[in-house]
Each structure stands twice: as structure tokens, then as C-alpha cells.
Amino acid sequence: MSSKNDARAIRASILLAAGLASAACSPRPVPQVLSVAAAADLQFALDDLSRGFRAAHPGLDLRIAYGSSGNFFAQIQSQAPFDLFLSADVEYPRKLIQKGIGAPDSIFVYAVGRIAVWVPEHSPLDPATALKSGAIRHLAIANPQHAPYGRAAESAMRTLGVYDGLQSKLVLGENVAQTLEFVQSGAADAGIVALSLALAPAVRPQGRYWEIPLDAYPKMEQGGVILKDSAAARAFRSWMTAPEGVRVLQRYGFSLPGK
């Protein structure tokens, strides 16, 4: 009896080992990837907002690239592999739809952007009067050629009557996040940046800001479009525009559409 029991135990061990080996060799399900091209002003707000989305969708691999809306617009027309585009200007998504790119019913306005003058904490400049100060040697703004925040900065300077005196002192960032980096690094004395960046917890202790009045530049309606239609892309759009997503955006200084 002992030998039979031993034989059965051995066979059971072999079957168990074979089962474990088979399970180990079985391919794991590949997570679905959702690739998002997002305007640089969203860097901190979207990182904050996406944490909850990732927790609610553990099987989804959310990948976010930040940069200039104009550059993304050009890349998407050249078939860059993004599923969702979050622009700092709703006109870019609208132009994509006009060109037959993206889901026609998927355009949405998620926020209204605002700009601010930002100076380092140690700077002797007062951000509220910095644009009129002769002490500024270099002023950083995003490149107006492809960055909506750069166009807003240029428009505000013209409205405030300081553009002619500052034009030769401008340092152009590839996007509004790089604009902030120029001031942080000392490459510029001050910068006109997205209010959302000035309010970010990682940035706020480093400097001081003055919000430029909204009537000094055209309203910055920020919009998105689903480029490759999927349940995941629509879920992220819904998450972003739901009450919790809206609260996150408001914490970073974005106004609600229509207000």
C-alpha cells in the first residue's frame, strides 16, 4: 500500500508541476494602451486628474505626452499614433475634424485657460508691475507661432501697451512649460505662463505670480478630440468632464467653459 501511495503522490506532484509550468508559460493579457497628446499647460493638472482614472481602469495603460498644441496638430496630420488630443486651443481639434481626422462627434471644450506673469521667489521684481519694469532683461513666453499660450501672451502685452518695449527682450519657449523652465533656470527674469503651472503645488513655493486680466487677451477655450474612437478614449473624456475632473481643473486655475 505504501508503494502505491507513493506512486500516486509522485504522479500528483508531476501533474501539479506540469500545470504550474503551463500557467507560467501562458501569455499574460496585453493591457490596452490609451495614448494622449496634451497641451503643456495641463502637465500638473492632468497628472493629478489621471491618478483616479488609472485606479479605476487598472487594465488600461494610459500614456500622456505633453507639448505644444501646434506641434501636436502638425504631428497628428502626419499620422502620429495618438488616440486623444487635448489642445490649449479648441480650434486645432476643429481643424482636424475639417480635414477628416478624428471622430466628428467627439470634440469637447473642457476648460478656459488663463495666463499670469511669474517671477522666482527671490526676484526683486513685483509680478504685477514686472512687464513695465526697465529691470527686465529677458522675458519668456511660449512661441506664438505654434503655442496658444504664446499668442495669448503676445496679445496681452499689446493690450497692456508694453509689447514694443519688450519685443527685443523676448525668449521663446517651445511650449508654455518650457517657458516656465526658462525663468526657473535664470535664463529669463520673468515669464508669461499658464496660471495652471503657477498654481501647481510643485511650482507655487518657487515663485510669485500676477494673473493678467481676462479682458487683456482673447478667451482661451481649450478643447479636445478623440482621434481613434474607442471605449477607453470616451471613458477618459467623460472622466475629465465629470464633476471630479472639473474640480481638479478648477484647483489649477482653469475656468469652466461658458463662464
Image: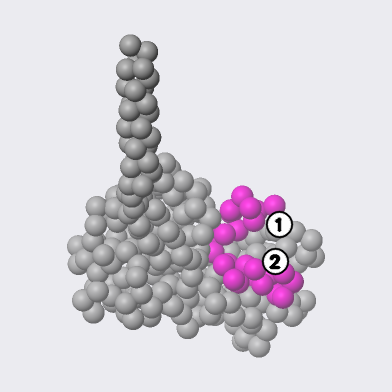
**Count of labels in the image:** 2
Q: At which x and y percent is residue 190?
A: 68, 71
User: Residue 233 shows which numbered tag?
Assistant: none
Q: Which residues are magenta?
A: 177-205
Judge whether residue 57 can be spotted in this image: no
Q: Earlier in the sequence, mark 2 or mark 1?
A: 2
Picture residue at 74% right of the left edge, 80% below the top = 137
Corner quadrant of residue 92: bottom left
Picture residue at 21% right of the left edge, 66% below the top = 103
Q: Is residue 243 above or below residue 10?
A: below
Circle 2: residue type: Gln
Q: At which x and y percent is residue 60?
A: 36, 50
User: Residue 184 shows which numbered tag?
Assistant: 2
Q: Please say if the residues under marks 2 and 1 sit with CB atoms less than 8 Å apart.
A: yes
Circle 1: residue type: Gln
Tell which of 259 and 186 is nearer to you.
Answer: 186
